[in-house]
Image (tube, helix red, strand yellow):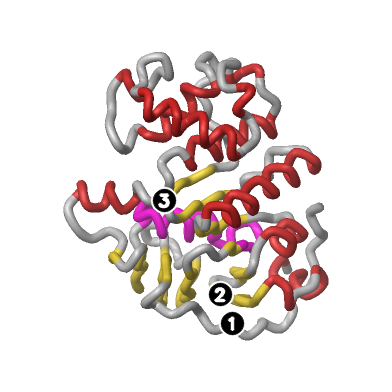
Amino acid sequence: MSLALAPVAAPVAPARPASPRVAELLVHDLAVAYGAAPPIFTGVGFAVGRSERVALIGANGAGKSTLLRSCLGFVAPLSGEILLFGRRVGEGKPGVRRALRGDVGFVAQKHNLVPRLSVLSNVVHGTLAEASGPRRWLQGLAPKAVRERAFAALDVVGLADLALRRADALSGGQSQRVAIARALVAEPRLMLADEPAASLDPAAGEEVMGVFAKVSRDTGTTLIFTTHHLDHALRHADRVIGLAGGRLRLDAPAATLALDSLHGLYG
């Protein structure tokens, strides 16, 4: 359930970040701007440990999506640095950067499935970073091991029985679960999800977020997701990070927070 905006509350003191030695993601003093425009945010810093589930919240324009894209190396920082699995994002040869991103699964708000292809073929597309060509576009041409991995990923999200159905015959919630399976088939260490429930009705959105949380718990995959649904942040994350006014205003365990305490981030 989305909440109404409220006046800005006093910032909540950031929680102590995970040790950089064990952090899957380490963001230090980060500032990002587009062209000559003022920075979207400055001085952002936090660390995410292995198997953590972190919700990133804030009003429209606060920089949530930009922060996720920065962590993937798609947006260059104005200052500061990002370490992903101990390597500095954006450094190294193109092959090194691609390999680093290969350990990260990404799920967007839009499902971006190929409508005329089967569910299984869409999941096989998640292995394109490993090898390109027709054998990674159509499940009927894919190597046996790849098809088995794709079936296993669909089973994790509860859709193995729909493997041969065309993607355009799915509901919105089912399509998003296929998108999760497509990200999972590459066996990522870290999953990033940008407003994964925003285009879904409340029941389907809750179902999808439950799948994300279960996958993270069962596989040990680290999860960072952005959301405007504050109840999703509190129910499905271990920790909540909040952006407001161009700064990091909140970093605290979800169990210590209440819905009312988060209203100020939307003022």
Q: Write the start and end of the magenta stretch as one range.
A: 55-75
Secondary element under disc 1, as helix, strand or loop, is: loop
Q: Name the kind of residue labelled 1 in the image.
A: Pro
Q: Where residue 201 sits: x, y (%)?
A: 77, 38
Q: Which residue is mark 3?
A: 104
Disc with the residue nearer the chain's start (2 vs 3) = 3
- Contact check, label 2 and label 3, Cβ < 8 Å: no
Label of residue 141 in the image: none
Instruction: Look at the image and tell me whether residue 44 can be seen.
Output: no
Q: Which residue is mark 2?
A: 248
Q: Which residue is mark 1?
A: 14
Image-based side of 199 in relation to 121, left or right? right
Q: Relative to the observer, which residue lies in front, 209 or 193?
A: 209
Image-based side of 93 in relation to 231, left or right? left
Decide: is 105 above or below 55.
above
Instruction: Look at the image and tell me whether residue 16 can be seen.
Output: yes
